[in-house]
């Protein structure tokens, strides 16, 4: 890596990007940090705002602007620009772009593609099939007795998955996804698969095309209410590392999932660079893949960045350039727990523009043990901070134990107030109850 400062453009405007930008700012290698328009109120002060929307139709101006600012690293946070091929469009010999190419991003953007790839490479996953017509999907369900999961095949922010208890629910799910198109065009086809049981992990790895560096495993909490009840969300909180993935399990995930996936992509002519995120269920028959994502998780990135001790710019630069084997990656031994404070009504309809109090004081009083990562926040004209999304902020606490980290995050989250604010107080409950049962 050149020792001169690296000017960076970070794409994305949410909680994950606030955590990435916060970590990038600690890097001695960072020159100027540029952000996309629409950055949340915590992220925006960390950089300058790019004058052009980062879209293919503005490519001509964007490229000239990237060159004029001498931006040599573009880091892509969300999946949508990756699926649209932003990496293919912006990569140049003098400019590295962190994230997979369009063909690689299909792993997340097209569940039918990823199911087929897993089947061909014998990667353990739920048994499932893809259907393009309602009739075929219904016929399949009518011939099944076991509980099923029905998924819109396209991208829909983690919400197009319906976990069903019985046949009736599966038929309703097909109707919602394919006929009513509740998740839009993503529901043109569905993947229907067996419902797995077990502990769910988020295993994120950095991949540079060749080298795979597995980050400490995280556990997300998808359902909106405590005790894992209610509809799925983008993620209500996450902690890292999780003791539910022991060394042996992580070895199996590496050997049976990550390595064969990168190899299978290579056989398709795809050099995969960026984050390979496997959502894995630890079933009685071993780890099985629920889904792949092609980017950092949200909220998993918040606890990961809170613990990362390496130089993030150096790591991303190397990863994007195929030089990951020289990176130094280490983690703070403490546990990080991120609790997401949400708007009333989320993941359904919710209001925006509500004034928020307590964003700063809680985190400040806890010193460097708590980080307040903004997500759906914006600065109003009068300078105050208001809500601007369903997941408003991710309070991320570090402590020697998960219990302490959870308590500190909860205490701090309580101070964040706006009408309808809610959060789960039980982030990490599965690990806590399994350690309680081990200790009893
Ligand atoms: P996905 O977007 O495919 O990860 O699905 C979202 C969530 O639905 C996952 O995090 C799981 O909690 C649940 N889920 C997805 N697929 C399955 C499955 N085959 N069995 C049980 N739960 C699943
Ligand atoms: N935390 C789930 C996701 O990022 O998809």
Image (spheres, rainbow, N blue to C red):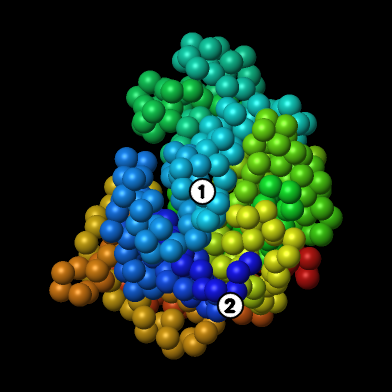
Looking at the rendered image, the quarter that the C terminus falls into is bottom right
Mark 2 CB within 8 Å of ligand 2: no
Return the residue at label 2: 398
* Vertical relation: 135 (above or below) 376: above
Q: How many marks?
A: 2
Lateral position of residue 74 relative to residue 46, left or right:
right
Q: Secondary structure at mark 1?
A: loop
Residue at the (38%, 51%) spot, across then down: 63
Nearer-the-camera pick, 369 or 433:
369
Nearer-the-camera pick, 167 or 4:
4
Residue at the (59%, 29%) spot, across then down: 113
Q: Residue 305 appears at what percent x and percent y?
A: 56, 69
Lateral position of residue 307 relative to residue 267, left or right:
left
* Vertical relation: 13 (above or below) 414: above
Q: Residue 215 appears at what percent x and percent y?
A: 68, 61
Quarter location, residue 386 = bottom left
Q: Residue 202 appears at what percent x and percent y?
A: 63, 53
Binning the other alpha carbons within 10 Å of mark 2 as few (below 14), some (14 to 19) or many (20 upward) gives many
Return the residue at label 1: 91
Q: Residue 90 appears at what percent x and percent y?
A: 46, 48
Using the image, tell me which numbered label, if any, was put on residue 305.
none
First of labels 2, 1 by sequence position: 1
Residue at the (62%, 22%) spot, across then down: 129
Which mark is nearer the camera, 2 or 1? 1
* Vertical relation: 315 (above or below) 192: below
């Amino acid at each position: 890596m050149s020792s001169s400062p690296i000017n960076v453009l970070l794409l994305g405007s949410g909680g994950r990007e606030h955590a990435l930008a916060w970590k990038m700012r600690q890097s001695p290698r960072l020159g100027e940090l540029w952000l996309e328009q629409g950055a949340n109120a915590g992220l925006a002060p960390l950089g300058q705002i790019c004058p052009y929307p980062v879209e293919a139709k503005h490519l001509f101006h964007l490229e000239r602007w990237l060159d004029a600012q001498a931006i040599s690293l573009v880091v892509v946070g969300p999946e949508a620009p990756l699926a649209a091929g932003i990496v293919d469009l912006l990569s140049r010999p003098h400019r590295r772009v962190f994230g997979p190419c369009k063909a690689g991003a299909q792993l997340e953007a097209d569940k039918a593609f990823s199911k087929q790839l897993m089947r061909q490479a014998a990667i353990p996953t739920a048994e499932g099939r893809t259907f393009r017509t309602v009739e075929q999907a219904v016929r399949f369900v009518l011939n099944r007795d076991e509980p099923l999961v029905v998924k819109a095949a396209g991208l829909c922010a983690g919400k197009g998955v319906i976990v069903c208890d019985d046949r009736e629910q599966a038929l309703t799910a097909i109707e919602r996804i394919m006929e009513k198109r509740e998740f839009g065009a993503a529901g043109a086809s569905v993947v229907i698969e067996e419902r797995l049981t077990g502990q769910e992990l988020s295993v994120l790895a950095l991949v540079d095309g060749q080298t795979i560096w597995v980050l400490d495993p995280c556990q997300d909490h998808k359902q909106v209410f405590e005790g894992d009840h209610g509809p799925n969300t983008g993620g209500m909180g996450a902690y890292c590392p999780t003791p539910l993935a022991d060394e042996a399990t992580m070895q199996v995930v590496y050997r049976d999932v990550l390595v064969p996936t990168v190899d299978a992509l290579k056989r398709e002519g795809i050099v995969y660079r960026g984050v390979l995120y496997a959502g894995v269920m630890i079933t009685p028959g071993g780890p099985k893949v629920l889904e792949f994502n092609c980017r950092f998780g949200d909220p998993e990135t918040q606890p990961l960045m809170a613990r990362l001790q390496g130089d993030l710019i150096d790591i991303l630069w190397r990863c994007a350039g195929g030089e990951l084997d020289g990176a130094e990656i280490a983690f703070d031994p403490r546990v990080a727990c991120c609790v997401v404070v949400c708007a009333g009504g989320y993941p359904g309809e919710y209001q925006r523009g509500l004034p928020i109090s307590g964003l700063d004081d809680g985190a400040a009083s806890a010193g460097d043990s708590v980080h307040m990562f903004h997500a759906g926040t914006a600065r109003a004209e009068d300078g105050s901070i208001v809500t601007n999304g369903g997941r408003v902020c991710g309070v991320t606490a570090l402590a020697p134990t998960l219990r302490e980290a959870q308590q500190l995050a909860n205490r701090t989250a309580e101070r964040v107030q706006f009408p309808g604010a809610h959060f789960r107080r039980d982030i990490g409950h599965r690990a806590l109850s399994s350690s309680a049962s081990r200790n009893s």
